[in-house]
Amino acid sequence: MIQVCLNGVRSAQDGSAVPLSPAALAESAAAAVAAGAAEVHVHPKTPCGSDSLSPRVVGPALEAIRAAVSVPVGVTTGAWAEPDPARRLERVRSWTVLPDYASVNWHEDGADEVAAALLDRGVGIEAGIWSDTPAAQRFLNSPHSSRVLRILAEVIGTSAEAAEPTAHTLLTELGTAHGRPILLHSHDGGTWPVLRLARRLGLDTRIGLEDVLVLPDGERAESNAQLVRAALACS
């Protein structure tokens, strides 16, 4: 399975290809799904371009994307969108339109509480496990670890050369991961090496302008759909 990650924390400064508004997200999602993406991950944005967990921001983004595609759609709950753990929990509980799943980063304070709130509302959880953080052990010790939808194994801040060894270390730390499926991916320079590794290992992965702005040959990507087509061609 290849998931498309439409925008992440990127902004208009990263180029016009990065979708920000609900309409742009819907258009980009539709093209990426037509290109072969099986799921959509999105960071809903305020009109100023900042990530937000507000129901007034999350709801319109989800509604627009769902009007354009029929695949599962997930959102972030990252601390950068709401740094205060109590406020983050309050935001999740206030959502009026629910995603199919949401990513929860286990190195962040309040992860267990956010996970519990999502499970109570029937929202699936992608357990974000960042490399070189205590996230793997925290997750494995969590009372919710066996109930998540999948593990989002994220190779963070590495060079292309270091990405694959770091990915292997992260997978070793996760072990059997309580039998949950693993989606393995990286960012920027590590994106394509880790995506190829995931494909070789038979793991789910993802691609999109959140993770990388260039194609495997270094050429600037024109769209999320172009990245999805390139990912499907990788082996």
Image (spheres, helix red, strand yellow):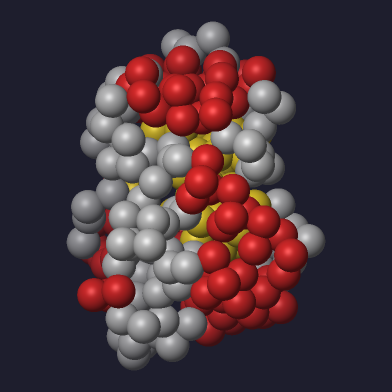
Q: Residue at x 39, y 46 (%)?
A: 52
Q: Residue furthest right?
A: 70
Q: Does residue 114 show up? A: yes
Q: Total of numbered circles in the picture?
A: 0
Q: Nearer the viewer, residue 90 or 148?
A: 90
Q: Residue at x 59, y 55 (%)?
A: 60
Residue 129 figure quarter: top left
Residue 25 figure quarter: bottom right
Q: Does residue 181 show up? A: no
Q: Residue at x 30, y 74 (%)?
A: 12
Q: Is residue 226 above or below residue 169?
A: below
Quarter holding the N terminus is bottom right
Quarter holding the C terminus is bottom right
Where is residue 218 shown, x and y percent of the image?
31, 85
Q: Is residue 175 above or below residue 211?
A: above
Q: Residue at x 56, y 20 (%)?
A: 117
Where is residue 26 shown, x and y percent of the image?
61, 70
Q: Nearer the viewer, residue 93 or 167?
A: 93
Residue 82 figure quarter: top left
Q: Is residue 92 toward the left or the right of residue 119 in the image? A: left
Where is residue 126 shown, x and y percent of the image?
55, 37
Q: Is residue 93 toward the left or the right of residue 210 in the image? A: right
Where is residue 80 shown, x and y percent of the image?
28, 41
Q: Is residue 35 toward the left or the right of residue 169 in the image? A: right
